[in-house]
Image (spheres, rainbow, N blue to C red):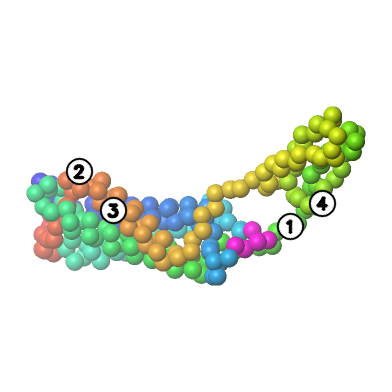
Amino acid sequence: MDSPSGKGLVAVLAAVGASTGAAAAVVWHVAIAGSSDGAPDFGSAYLRPNWFPITLYLVGAGLAIGLVAASFLVDTGLRLVQDRQRSRIDLFALLIVIGAMLGAGAALAWTYLPPQPTEVVVMPPVWPRYFETNDGAAGLHQSLYSGAIGGISVDPYSDTNSATIVLESDVVPSTFTPTIGNPWLVFPVGGVLVAALVALTLSLRDFRLTVVSRSDQDAV
């Protein structure tokens, strides 16, 4: 069994804070805030922050919160030790609570500073072209009823004035934009998952929590 280490606990909590901040930065860059009534916001686009400096801000905030929490816990005598004989429940419980607190902080920031919608610049419409048969003569026309490019299959030997119009996909391709409807659920759960993953990694390496007295000089 190794000697209890306060520095190891500080490093673990700092890693949990930085990892949670990095995960929140990914959400900030990818997801959008849901509307209050649940209706889609047509005609709106979202200004997502760049990776820098939002990643620096969130990782730095998570790191600072982890270090502050670690300073209080180390001062109370809590240490990290490598001893498989001890229970791993305490380690999981501590890190999950820290992860939930970090997630709640991210949810608070998301509530006041989510990606902001802005007006979309409306470009001139692109009218799809189609062929229309008229007694076997095909003519090129413009359609005013759709914004997608259409493809046509025409039978020039047909006696009827008909044409088959096959519409393609929209001009603007769809992108992956998850919506955060309840940040006070999404971010704390995400923080718990990050912290639980760290706790599982440590427990597999036989790291556990222990409490030592302040007079123990070896528990640094």
Magenta residues span 40-45
Q: Amino acid at mark 2?
A: Arg
Which amino acid is tagged 3? Ala
Which label sits in the foreground, 4 or 3? Answer: 4
Q: CA distance from mark 2 to mark 4?
A: 66 Å
User: Could you give the CA–CA distance between mark 3 and mark 1, rounded to whole angstroms?
Assistant: 44 Å
Magenta span: helix, strand or loop, mainly?
loop
- Quarter in which the C terminus is drawn: bottom left
Look at mark 4 in the image and give the residue it sits on. 144
Residue 90 badge: none
**Residue at 29 percent of width and 50 percent of height:** 198
Q: CA distance from mark 4 to mark 3?
A: 56 Å
Crowding near the residue tagged with mark 2, few <14, some 14–19, many ≥20 C-alpha atoms within 10 Å:
few
Return the residue at label 3: 196
The amino acid on which the numbered mark 4 sits, given as a three-letter code, is Leu
Label located before the other in sequence (4 or 3): 4
Tag 1 and tag 2, C-beta contact below 8 Å = no
Q: Earlier in the sequence, mark 2 or mark 4?
A: 4
- The answer to whether residue 169 shows anywhere in this view is yes
Residue 121 is labelled as: 1
- Residue at x 24% of width, y 60% of height: 94
Q: CA distance from mark 1 to mark 2?
A: 55 Å
Residue 148 rendering spot, x and y as whole percentages: 73, 46
> Distance of mark 4 from mark 1, alpha carbons?
20 Å
